[in-house]
Image (cartoon, rainbow, N blue to C red):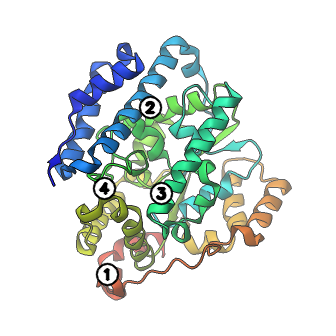
Amino acid sequence: MSKRFLDAQALMAGACANSGLSDYLDEGLRERFAYVIDLFNGFAAIPEDKYAAAAQQVQDTLVKRLQVARDWARHPEILDQKIVQPFFVLGSARAGTTFTQMILDLDEGHRTPRYHDVQHPSPPPGSDRAADAAALAEQGEYVEFILENSPSLLPAHPYFDQRGATEAEDEYVYSLDFDLVYPLWYLKVPSLPQTIPPRDPARAFRFYRHMLCQLQFKRPTRRWVGKGILHQYMPGPLMQEFPDMVGFWLHRPPEEYIASLLQLLEHQYAPFNGDLYDVTPEAMVAQLKMGVDAILADPAIDDPRLHHIRFRDFVSNPADCIAAIYDAHEIPFTDGFADAIRSRTTDPAYRADRFGKFSYSLEKFGLDKDALRRTFADYCDRFDI
């Protein structure tokens, strides 16, 4: 079967023609869109029978970005809003970051971006009840598409049971500006590459702030709870954009999260990449080691706004971990929040294994616990894990 590469110019022309939003495709956005297309094409060409669906999904994503640009041009007051003392969860994938995000979101007035917010940011949520309902339903159908193609993702990430209201990672939000490739925008594109950090973290976080303004324009929000698995590689730019932020940084032993991560990637990418899936354990460990070395060399990790938490401590007693951090920032830790945490963590409907146990092992991937402990010894020692 023949294969084709994505054509950035044709996709931009199609998006503008179908949406009538060509006035909002500026040179910066053109360059970033072309960059993302180059990442796809650098990974692989697309089989002919899958090309139309892939191209349509990429084009639809660009239209959503143009719609947001239109909203900001017509209503500049959207971007005048304040984002006050947001919380950010940092840490590696499979280190308990989504669990922490979910728990922090339980406090009164807290809000975390949801799939339906991210995929349907225009009109701003809360502007039109019918549009909000349609966004939630459409995202519910998209999660069903994901799970139909990879049923094992549900035990791995049981939060999918919320369908269109699933908690979103921050990368999902700011990747709409085409500074990186995030998988949930492009699961119909077989040439989907692995996610790498944005070229310009400051620009990415500035866009993220603007998106939070978009999402709260018609739904006032006291405090946002963000979560990003790439934040740990760029905490400085994150704190520069959000100087009053509070960071909850989770650390899990490498022999635990690496095996879990490799198993997750098989479920997340292989069903959509098909024969193009090429993650190897050796390459992943080397990539993670480079990332850890960069983290340890970054003086920003000692900033008092960032609170380092052992995975086992947070899972066993999230209320105590959070209360101590709240106290450090003079944030009231209320009885109501404590009750909400207790209720959520003891409710069988929220058990991590409610859809079956997510199984993974180092042995499957040819990895050894002691070897990983040696490789990541500096990291383990620094964060006492």
Residue, x 27% and y 39% (percent of image)? 36
Q: Earlier in the sequence, mark 2 or mark 1?
A: 2
In the rendered image, the residue lying farthest to the right is 335
> On the image, numbered disc 4 is attached to which residue?
194
Residue 53 left/right relative to 313: left
Question: In the image, 146: left or right of 124?
Answer: left
Residue 198 visible, this orientation = no
Kindly report the distance in space between the C-alpha atoms of the residues bearing marks 1 and 3: 24 Å
User: Position of 180 compared to 70: left or right?
Assistant: left
Place of residue 243 in the rendered image (x, y in percent of width and height, measured from the top left): 52, 37
Alpha carbons under labels 4 and 3: distance apart: 17 Å
**Residue underneath mark 3:** 146
Are there few (<14), some (14-19), or many (20+) residues within 10 Å of tag 1? some
What residue sits right under mark 1 in the picture?
Answer: 365
- Residue 145 lies, with reference to residue 207, above or below; the image says below
Of the residues tagged 4 and 3, which is closer to the observer? 3
Task: For marks 2 and 4, give the CA distance.
Answer: 23 Å
Can you tell which of label 3 and label 2 is closer to the viewer? 3
Q: Amino acid at mark 4?
A: Gln
* 41 with respect to 288 (left or right): left
**Is the residue marked by circle 3 packed among few (<14), some (14-19), or many (20+) residues within 10 Å?**
many
Q: Position of residue 157 (x, y in %)?
A: 54, 65
Nearest to N terminus: mark 1 or mark 3: 3
